[in-house]
Amino acid sequence: MLPSRSFDSTSDRAKKNGYYSFGDEGLTATVGASGQLLRISRHFPGKRAGFCVDEPDMEEPFRVTPRLKQFLYRAEDPSFENGIGTYVDALHLNRQVYYSELIHDRWPAFKIGSLDVNLDLQYAILDGTVYQTFKFDYSQITRNGSKPTSPPIIRLRGDSLIRNLDYITLPGQNPFNNTDDSGYKPARLEGGSIFREHEDEDGKQSFFSIMAFNDEHVFEIVEAPTLQIGEMPADYLLGWDYLLKWDEQASKDIDQYGRLSVTMAYRLGYDQSPVRPVDTVQSAEQLDLSTMPYEAQIFSNNPNLDVCLRKNLEHVLSVCSIPVVSTRGDEVPTIALTCGDVDSHFVSTAASL
């Protein structure tokens, strides 16, 4: 559970209901007001444009205004359930975002509830990976004498799109960004993780991978059976083709403690092996933001103003500022100042620093 001290006491957290972008070293992501992961973007040194992971029906980067309007509509909707990350069945009905906040002025966190479960949801980026940590709390219903019959169903999709953020080249001249581009390979499972791969005209491969773990081990992800309602599949589950496979310990944890946690790890890579082992214990420790040293910067005598200044400064430095050239040692990195993740990192030459 996220301790209350992780949140700024000066923020009006009970009324906060918005979307957030966050980032680190050229890897950025955006989560909507509902807590759903909507986009991941990354710039790879030496490439003309960055890459992103889109929902299957998202407008191409070239269509700047329609794409932004479509994205904002989803980002601002506190009931939106799709995205590129996970779908939790227990939150499908009566989902309510109690509040949300940026931990350490940087990392999004949400309190979400439904009839069956309360959820603390936390995001962070570490070593080129986006992490999404779920902490399910069933203690409310267990106090009423009820018990969940099984761990929550967490679905994942394998049809997300990998695109380059080229908003200049005409769509007909940039087939890589087409929904049906021939460079896509069918999503596959390897080592319990999902891999989505997309090859460009130079034979180089970009990939998007998803895995799940806790502080003890890596969970397996399996193909989901088709859910039928009468004779028809459930429309709201189309595309969510994979399931997190819980182990026996998960059921024991719910029965004994009324709580359960899992962390999803998302990686967007280019021209490199997508398979990389994860030190689950070390990652879990590093992602415990409540124990991470943090000193809030003071800019004025107004605490509320300082909160706004800190959050805006963190956003500019970690989301809008993108390293575009690899550096060595003490070299000063080349930085592009972009519009941020929501606007697909549009940047002009004049914005380079």
Image (cartoon, rainbow, N blue to C red):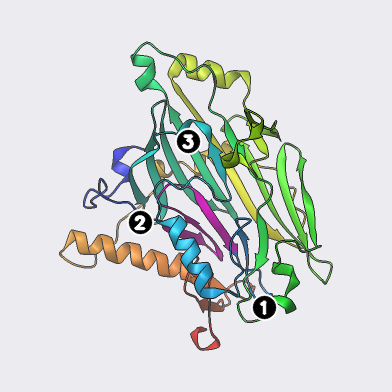
Mark 3: amino acid:
His
SS under mark 1 = loop
Which of marks 3 and 1 precedes in the sequence?
A: 1
Q: Residue 290: x, y in percent?
A: 38, 42
Disc 1 from disc 3: Cα separation: 40 Å
Q: Main secondary structure of the magenta part?
A: strand
Of marks 1 and 2, the one in the foreground:
1
Q: Which residue occupies 35% across, 21% down?
A: 140
Q: Residue at x 20, y 60 (%)?
A: 304
Which quadrant of the figure has residue 141? top left
Magenta residue check for 297: no
Provide the residue designation for mark 1: 48
Which labelled disc corresponds to residue 105? Answer: 2
Q: Which residues are magenta?
A: 20-41
The residue sitting at the top extreme is 145
| Residue 267 in the image, given as x and y percentages of width and height | 64, 53
Secondary structure under tag 3 reads loop
Pointer 3 residue: 92
- Magenta span includes 32: yes
